[in-house]
Amino acid sequence: MEKIEKINWKPKWDGGAPMPRIYNRDFKTYLTYVVADWDEESITEFKTLEHDGYDEYFALVGFDGKTFKFGIANDEVFSGLPNYEQGIEWAQIVQNSKWIEELKRIHKVHPYYDEAKWDNWNHYLLTFKDEILEIVATGYEIEIFRTSSKRIAQEVVDRINK
């Protein structure tokens, strides 16, 4: 049975307009979002990117994984999500994930399939106001930038094209 385990995710995204964006290439998936104004006090370290125009805090999350679902539902229909009754919040890991089991079944036909390889994979579930991100990854790293929306997007594109 799937079980939701909450993650102490920092920094939190803006509850009204988080503007999450997804970028993907090979085995790396990037998420950017606007950091909540009320969470700025928890930001002790950030990078500044040169830009022209309005700036704010953005989180840049690099996931080590490429299988994801994005969009799915908004906050008005979260109660229809599987496992909702367990208390879905900002960020969580889905333990005993049916999705990971499905991926394992698909990959079992490969001649070099290794069951142990899957031990390090997690099913992350992040709920934004108008989108949900579900991603299967071995981990993630969060960086904070003070910059513009356009410039954070360019930073991700630069990383993808290295």
Image (spheres, helix red, strand yellow):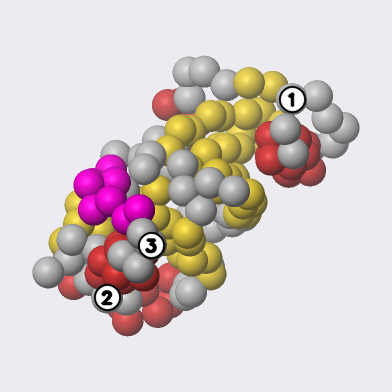
Image disc number at residue 77? none
Looking at the image, which residue is at 87% across and 32% down?
Answer: 52
**Left or right: 59 as drawn, with respect to 117:** right
- Estimate the x, y position of residue 87 in percent, counting from the top left: 21, 63
Nearer the observer: mark 3 or 1; the answer is: 3
Which of the two labelled residues, at mark 3 and mark 1, occupies the earlier sequence position? Answer: 1
What secondary structure is the magenta-colored segment mainly?
Answer: helix
Which amino acid, by three-letter code, is at mark 1? Leu
Magenta region, residue range: 112-120
Q: Look at the numbered discs 3 and 1 and tell me whether their residues touch, using CB distance below 8 Å.
A: no
Residue 46 position by quadrant:
top right
Q: CA distance from mark 2 to mark 1?
A: 39 Å
Which residue corresponds to mark 3?
Answer: 110
Looking at the image, which residue is at 17% across and 66% down?
Answer: 2
Which amino acid, by three-letter code, is at mark 3? His
Specify whether residue 149 is painted magenta. no
- Estimate the x, y position of residue 145 in percent, counting from the top left: 62, 29
Specify whether residue 115 is painted magenta. yes
Which residue corresponds to mark 2?
Answer: 82
- Classed neighbour count for the residue bearing mark 1: other residues with Cα under 10 Å, few (<14), some (14–19), many (≥20): some
Q: Compared with residue 41, is residue 60 higher up or lower down, i.e. above or below?
A: below
How many marks the image carries: the answer is 3
Q: Look at the numbered discs 2 and 1 and tell me whether their residues touch, using CB distance below 8 Å.
A: no
Q: CA distance from mark 3 to mark 1?
A: 43 Å
Nearer the observer: mark 3 or 2; the answer is: 3
- Estimate the x, y position of residue 63 in percent, counting from the top left: 48, 43
Image disc number at residue 49? 1
